[in-house]
Image: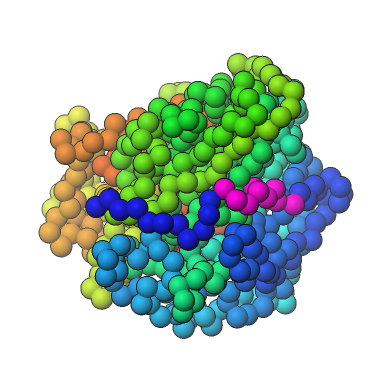
Amino acid sequence: MTRTLVPQLTPFIDALPLPQRLIAEEHHGGLVVRMRMGEHRFHRDMPVSKIWGYEGMVPGPTIEAERGHPVAVEWRNELEGPFPLVVTSAPTHADARGVPVQCVPGLSGGTADRNAAALTGHAVVHLHGGLTPAVYDGWAENLLAPGQSAVFHYPMDQRAALLWYHDHVMGITRFDVYAGLAGLWIVRDERERELGLPEGSPFEVPLLIQDRNFDLDEHGRLTGRLIHKTDPETLEAFAPFTVVNGKVWPALDVQPAVYRLRVINASNARTYRLVLVRNGDPDLDRITQIGTDHGLLRAPTRMPSDGLVLASAERADLLVDFSDLAPGSVLTLFNTAKAPFDGARFAATRAETAADVAGLLPHPEVMRFRVVAGSAQRRVFPAALAIDYGVPSLEELADAKRRAIALVERELKGEPNMLTMRELAPVMDSDSTGLLTVTHDGRTTRYRAVAAHFEDVTTFFPVLGEYEVWQLINLTRDTHPIHVHLDPFQILSRRPIRYEIAEGGTEDLAITAAVTLEHDPADQLDHTIDDNERGLKDTVRVNPNEVVEIAVRFTNYSGRYMYHCHILEHEDRDMMRPFVTMPMELMPFMA
Ligand SMILES: [Cu+2]
């Protein structure tokens, strides 16, 4: 089904806002950030929206810190009801015209969820990408009620990178982040300064990309009221309007110079594949990627030929060279990824025609760059970027603890599907049932699921300082961005699998399935690791028919942390699990 929906808002009207900067050094490392109800205008032609935001803003202030200089933030919960967001599940997947309801504004026949409307503003802040002691990491159950506050200490003993802080409340992260509780956090260090990278305005520009939907009044006009809408077939919210730094489809005037774009996908569920288009053609060669989730790559990389894929919470540090362009040149950023994202390719040459309502992508526009007059500034950046990390060697990994996790979707009658990460333990006995087998080169390993839900027993106790290899096995039809709190990891491999789940084999905990590490003939994906993924990551896409192996080594902080799918609707139901990092010398005392 292809159909073009006329957008109810004119694109490229509003100027791209730059979030307010909150520079920790200027406050001697001590900051106060209040969570507050606010009013925010997402587009010039729409009334203001009520939001919950840090300092009452969307996005919150960008906190900037220096490596090695600790930052203490007093997070003050001053949220007030009523909850500014209408949560609804529409009764049907598509409207009378056959258009999926998620592609259009309004409630689409749904009613406001009363439990969501009754939310009063419990909150907890997580610094995503922070190497943070467990007590300040924002455990999803340790909440601040309105009127309460807490000082979180962030050591900032970590390399320069674009992080972000956002709400992480158990079961409702998807609503709190959607209501506005997200902001950027930039760590800076000497290595980046040696390289002469742009820092601050005008040549360093953060781009925080989200999708949002809004309510309609009785005349069909947008009211500005935020809507989180799902439907019987799609448990994630994929909203039709793309919002960058809080504006729908904004525009940025750029000089003929090199810009550093710090891009983050802060959407609940939507994956973007970003393609820059000029005069109808993809113009990806002017973009060089220098960094990923945890900062600089070892060497600059070019864009993947289809465009830059960023799933929820993934970041990219980009240099975009506009220096050869005449004033008046226009470049438009498009998204070509349909939703839910399953890794399927889409040629960059077709980016302008990526609209696809069946793929819940009614408006592929993201934002626009307009070149204005200025003296052309060319800059050359070094070919060597990061010099502080390498790929873990086979020797380092030889004795690594290996863990396996199956990503499983379970259909439930009369309620939305349940997604879980099943932690697997090898079993020896031969006659058990309820097993998941993994066959590789003729050798079969048999596993039993020992934990699936957040509240199940903790089974992961990584020892500080030691490498571990985690194997993420996707038995679903969607791509899941898996995020591990605390230390970053490196992607070791991404390989195709074929698998069969036994009839009725997906139980609440047990899973009966046979996985083979070989290509499924029906599978179109190439299961490669992009060059821009060969850095320090904290979120990795695990595509359908795929197993991804990561090497992770936790370093300084012991305690209880979480790892989870960063599709917030999945994280909330129930794709999140705890792990406990342990000092080596305590291990003999563990039962
Ligand atoms: Cu997921």
Q: In the rendered view, would you say 327 is above or below 437?
A: above
Pick the residue in front: 54 or 142.
54
SS assignment for the magenta stretch, majority = loop
Q: Is residue 92 magenta?
A: no
Residue 131: give x, y in percent of width and height. 64, 45
Q: In the rendered view, would you say 437 is above or below 82?
A: above
Pick the residue in front: 459 or 155.
155
Residue 473: give x, y in percent of width and height. 31, 45
Colour pattern of the rendering: rainbow
Residue in view at x 68 percent, y 19 percent = 378
Residue stretch rendered in magenta on the structure: 12-20
Pick the residue in front: 173 or 208.
208
Residue 145: give x, y in percent of width and height. 65, 76
Residue 229: give x, y in percent of width and height. 42, 68
- The count of marks equals 0
Residue in view at x 76 percent, y 57 percent = 73
Q: In the rendered view, would you say 55 is above or below 128?
A: below
Residue in view at x 67 percent, y 78 percent = 80
Residue in view at x 14 percent, y 55 percent = 502
| Residue 529 sits in quarter | top left
Pick the residue in front: 397 or 414.
414
Does any portion of residue 424 appear in the rendered image? Answer: no
Does any portion of residue 219 appear in the rendered image? Answer: yes
